[in-house]
Amino acid sequence: NINYKNIPILSIKIDFIESDIDDLKYHLKEAKRHNKEKVEELESKISKLKDEKNSILNSIHDAFIHVEKPFRGINNIIFTVDEIKELIYKTDSKIYDKFYLEIEDEHITLKPVNISIDL
């Protein structure tokens, strides 16, 4: 039984990206003063890192779980929205359709079981 919340790979990756962006912003500031030839290259690198960070942060919109075989007994499906809010569903011994999140302005719903939390 693996609890994926305890494997903070994406959080660490975001931290590294933010650190790289901060570092590049410093170099960009220096390049604007001393070496204008590097400005465009540094701005491009910053833009790519910001796109990568946004891609990770927006990946919740594409997240789903597909269960190929029936569950045996009771299992938990947990979507962690942030460190405080989670959608938790206890399964039965049966086959389920694909689990996914439906995101609206004020709440997030785990489909197809229709469990929601307010944002």
Image (cartoon, helix red, strand yellow):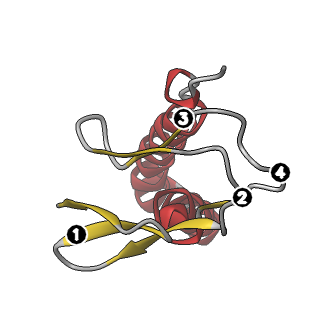
| Residue at which label 2 appears | 95
SS at mark 2 in the image? loop
Q: Are marks 3 and 1 in contact (CB under 8 Å)?
A: no
Image quarter hosting the N terminus:
top right
Spatial distance from mark 2 to mark 3, Cα to Cα? 39 Å
Given contact means CB atoms under 8 Å apart, are the residues at marks 4 and 3 in contact? Answer: no
Q: Where 31 falls versus 48 (above or below)?
A: above
Q: Which residue is mark 4?
A: 69
* Whole-number angstrom distance, CA of label 2 to CA of label 4: 6 Å
- Circle 2 packing at 10 Å, graded few (<14), some (14-19), many (20+), is few
Q: Secondary structure at mark 1?
A: strand
How far is mark 1 from mark 4, CA to CA? 30 Å
Q: Provide the residue designation for mark 1.
A: 107
Q: Amino acid at mark 4?
A: Lys
The first of marks 1 and 4 along the sequence is 4
- Check the picture and name the quadrant holding the C terminus: bottom left
Q: Are marks 1 and 4 in contact (CB under 8 Å)?
A: no
The amino acid on which the numbered mark 1 sits, given as a three-letter code, is: His
On the image, numbered disc 3 is attached to which residue? 16
Q: Is residue 103 above or below residue 29?
A: below
The residue that appears at 35% across and 75% down in the rendered structure is 103
Q: Which amino acid type is marked by label 3? A: Phe
SS at mark 4 in the image? loop
Q: Earlier in the sequence, mark 4 or mark 3?
A: 3
Q: Residue at x 37, y 69 (%)?
A: 114
Question: Measuring 61% from the left and 69% from the top, which residue is drawn there?
Answer: 44
